[in-house]
Amino acid sequence: MNITDSIKYVGVNDHGIDLFEGQYIVPNGMAYNSYLIEDEKIAVMDSVDAAFGNAWLDNIEKALKGKKPDYLIVQHMEPDHSANITTFADTYPDAVIVSSDKAFKMMQNFFGTDFADRRIVVGDGDTLSLGGRELTFVTAPMVHWPEVIVTYDGTDKVLFSADAFGKFGALDVDEDWACEARRYYMGIVGKYGMQVQTLFKKTKDLDINIICPLHGPVLSDDLGYYISLYNAWSSYEPEEKGITIAYTSVYGNTKKAVEYLAEKLEKAGAKVALSDLARSDMAEVVEDAFRYDRLVLATTTYNADIFPFMKEFINHLTERNFQNRTVALIENGSWAPTAAKVMRGMLEGSKNLTFTENTVKIMSAVNDQTKAQLDALAAEILGNTTDSDGGEN
């Protein structure tokens, strides 16, 4: 696949993977992207996962048509992008490895060599001439590993963005970009919003027409759309108005309560994402919690604590700096309900959370008193986004 006249795609698709990074369900596989820039000198951008070394080298050979690469640029040392560095180095012994100082230290750890006799160490603002074009390097520490660099080709106005702007899914599958890019971002990069914002500042003056990430499709049309989403995600601002209801239920009573609440909210015209944490993909629910501006947490008191799936969910949120949202709490307990107190305590370190005045307490089963509490909570949740004309914002 030609990205431009001089830049070719030489990556691979992985449809054999079931869990990415050992935890994220990827029903449509993964793409491990690699690119080849052909000028007076030839640079290959990043390696691929260990299982695809031969396919990757075949792609490079076909693209080169008898030529040899001069450089392998390593932007990120996570094994799905770096596993075949030594294979490349053995195949092309005259090629030079280009990367950050921290990446070379990681290579020593991974491979037992830091390529001291055939390397170029680059940092912020450093350049590499390929002849007719010049590549400029920008450090991007903790997006999402400390050694990361991104690379700008000013001739074709291409930003090679490492894991930034990546998504789940192989490239030969047609699916919505935002959904799987959001889930990817929240799961993998989400903790590092400040670092993503720093990268935005470093690259704001670059004239970018194409973004080439290490996962997911090459982005070229309406870059403002992708950048605006990434800006919202990395600044922890809600992407849109809506209500995520995340719950656990042992015998179905808490489920009845949240279904009653969801129906009230939906009848009022609100967008609602309702998820049973014991049965849903946790990453999908995390995605919803960051996507929408309001969150309802409903769970049972369990061993004087909260149900394990809810505890895990809140941990996922706080690990990723959950903030700038309105949160409502629903607790269930037959004799000593403490779930609301526990959930609130787990979130007390999160920034800019507004808790609703109404907290719903279910004593075993839903009854008329419970419904009255849920009605009051629904009115408050909807009231948080009611404009002067009485319509929902």
Image (tube, grey):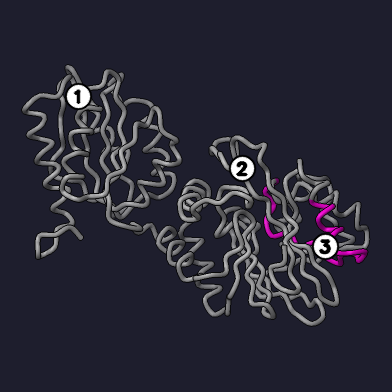
Tell me whether the residue at label 1 lies in contact with that at label 3, contact meaning CB atoms closer than 8 angstroms: no
Residue highlighted by disc 1: 337
Q: Is 7 within the magenta?
A: no
Q: Quadrant of the N terminus?
A: bottom right
Q: Sequence-wise, which precedes: disc 1 or disc 2?
A: 2
Instruction: Name which residue lies at 57% across and 78% down.
Output: 206
Tell me whether the residue at label 3 lies in contact with that at label 2, contact meaning CB atoms closer than 8 angstroms: no
Magenta residues? 56-79
Residue highlighted by disc 3: 63
Q: CA separation, marks 1 and 2?
A: 43 Å
Q: Quadrant of the C terminus?
A: bottom left
Measured from the top left, where is residue 52 in percent x and y?
77, 44
Residue highlighted by disc 2: 29
Q: Secondary structure at mark 1?
A: loop
Q: Sequence-wise, which precedes: disc 1 or disc 3?
A: 3
Q: Sequence-wise, which precedes: disc 3 or disc 2?
A: 2
Query: Tag 1: Cα neighbours inside 10 Å, few (<14), some, or many (≥20)?
Result: many
> Considering only vertical position in the picture, is 332 above or below 320?
above
Where, by quadrant of the figure, is residue 259 drawn?
A: top left
- Count of marks overlaid on the render: 3
Query: Tag 2: Cα neighbours inside 10 Å, few (<14), some, or many (≥20)?
Result: many
Q: CA separation, marks 3 and 2?
A: 24 Å
Q: Can residue 247 be seen here?
A: yes
